[in-house]
Image (tube, rainbow, N blue to C red):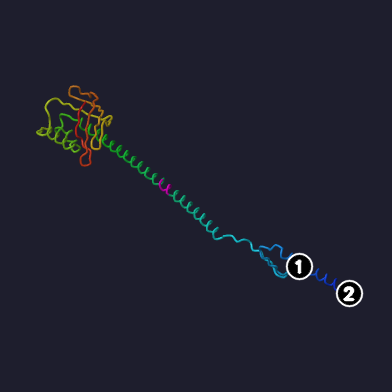
Amino acid sequence: MLQKKINTPKIIPTVIACLLVVLLAAFGCKKDEEAPATTDEVVTNSPDEEVTFTSPSLDTESTTDTNTTDEGQDTEETATDTNTTETNTTEESTNATISTNETNLSTTDTQSSSTEESQVLKLAETLAEIYGTYTNKDKQPFKNLQDIKPYASQKMAAWIDGKTSGSASTTSDGAFYGITTKALSSAAIDSGSTSYKVLVTCQQEEITEVTQSPQKDYQLLEMYFVKESKEWKLDGAFWK
């Protein structure tokens, strides 16, 4: 009995130490369990391993497609602008050409009309002098009418033939007289594509056996021209 009492004090400290150890161990485990768990897995590399960080990748294909689309649109717009400019230039050139051609045609028509009128007026002055110059002592009766017949229309030629037919004598009875006509000026007072009406101002000198000196006078000769076989022909002449 005495021996058991003596050993009891040695066992108690040992038991207490064991309890403390158990309590500390339990406390440590509980602390580890209450530690918040990390949401991401952390990988720890050894000091010798190189840590590489990868930057976020960009959608290069999408960007390239967008840029390509923009460039394509710009190219199409540029091409459209160029085509529009070329079209406008072509239209302006075409319009300018048409305007030039119309101007040339108008100028040509004006020049042609002016040239044709000049020819008619010159012909009128020449025929007026022939028509108004004659004498009663001509070897060929009505020589003035016969001289203008090649320039007369069919109607005028028929009138000349009727006027000169049956005139076989080379001289006429009576005292000598003669008239010389000179055209001073002419003007077209009416005109068309196939007809002209011309007024010729004439100076006439008449001489007779009695006067024996020229007597000057001025008269107007109204002349009509028509186009036959593309040529201008005298269709009538009347002293005013």
The location of residue 228, given as percent across then percent down, is 20, 40
Q: Is residue 147 left or right of residue 14?
A: left
Residue nearer the viewer, 130 or 209 = 130
Residue nearer the viewer, 124 or 145 = 124
Residue beneath label 1, please?
A: 26
Residue extent of the magenta highlight: 87-91
Answer with the quarter of the image where residue 137 lies. top left
Answer with the quarter of the image where residue 11 lies. bottom right
Residue nearer the viewer, 34 or 39 = 34
Amino acid of disc 1: Ala
Total labels drawn: 2
Tell me the quadrant of the picture where the N terminus can be found.
bottom right
Answer with the quarter of the image where residue 203 lies. top left
The location of residue 31, given as percent across then percent down, is 74, 64
Q: Residue at x 60, y 61 (%)?
A: 57
Q: Is residue 52 left or right of residue 66?
A: right
Residue nearer the viewer, 46 or 89 = 46
The location of residue 105, given as percent across then percent down, is 33, 42
Residue found at the very far top of the displayed protein: 210
Residue beneath label 2, please?
A: 5
Q: Check the image and report above or below for 184 versus 116.
A: above
Instruction: Assess disc 2: are there few (<14), some (14-19) or many (≥20) residues with their C-alpha within 10 Å of its C-alpha.
Output: few
Look at the numbered disc 1 and give the secondary structure of its residue.
Answer: helix
Amino acid of disc 2: Lys
Magenta span includes 73: no
